[in-house]
Image (cartoon, rainbow, N blue to C red):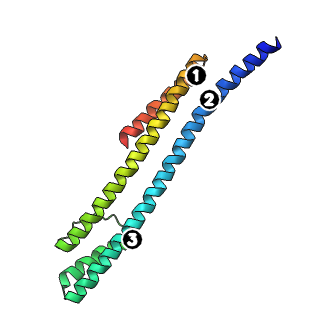
Amino acid sequence: MRIVFLMCWAVLGVATSLAQDLKSCLAQYEKDLAAFAEERQATIKRLSEVYADNLESLLAQAKKDGDAVLQQAAAGELERVRKGESVSGGEPPKHPDLKAARAKHEETLRLRDRGVARKIDELTKTCDRSLEKLADSLATRGRPDEATDARMARTTLNSRRAVT
């Protein structure tokens, strides 16, 4: 009798821990996503600072060369960047040097975003596999409601991955 009780307690404990695993898996996923978002924001800030430095150099060179058109355009772009406005937003610059500087900056941002997207995709796949195993374990242990919750979490997760 005592052995049966201990076995039932162990099975109940495993099923309870599986339900906790669902919450833990999703909580960790959200925490990791938040970390990626912070990392991305820090990267964008650093790249914007590099772009601003490039604009300052371009502005200094324009002043040295006496190029009033480039001075005005570079000063306006520099002001936008310092205000924190999106580099991609607004009207594209007309001056070729400024166009080239912005294009280089935007390409760097795109490359960084692709890297972040790959990290998020891998994180999502890992979490998805964990949720699939969890749902199967819950189903085999006779916990269909919790297995359904895990499957719903997978569906939500995969919808999020499609959007990302």
Q: Residue furthest top?
A: 1
Mark 1 and mark 2 residues within 8 Å of each other at the beta carbon: yes
Q: Are marks 3 and 2 in contact (CB under 8 Å)?
A: no
Residue 40 drawn at (x, y percent): 43, 57
Work out whether 42 lies above or below 120. below
In which quadrant of the rendered view does residue 146 lie? top right
Nearest the viewer among 115 and 13 is 115
The local crowd at label 1, few if under 14, some if 14 to 19, many if 20 or more residues have their Cα within 10 Å, is: many
Q: Which residue is mark 2?
A: 19
Element under disc 3: helix
Which amino acid type is marked by label 1?
A: Leu
Question: In this rendering, would 118 be left or right of 1?
Answer: left
- Mark 3 Cα-neighbour bin, 10 Å: few <14, some 14–19, many ≥20: some
Query: Can residue 88 be seen by looking at this rendering?
Result: no
Circle 1/circle 3 CB separation < 8 Å: no
Q: Earlier in the sequence, mark 1 or mark 3?
A: 3
| Quadrant of the image containing the C terminus | top left
The answer to whether 65 is drawn above or below residue 74 in the figure is below
Element marked by disc 2: helix
Q: Residue at x 62, y 29 (%)?
A: 19
**Residue that label 1 marks:** 138
Q: Is residue 147 visible?
A: yes
Q: In x, y percent, where is residue 100? A: 21, 68
Q: Amino acid at mark 3?
A: Glu
Marks 1 and 2, the one that precedes in the sequence: 2
Amino acid beneath label 2: Ala
Q: Which residue is mark 3?
A: 49
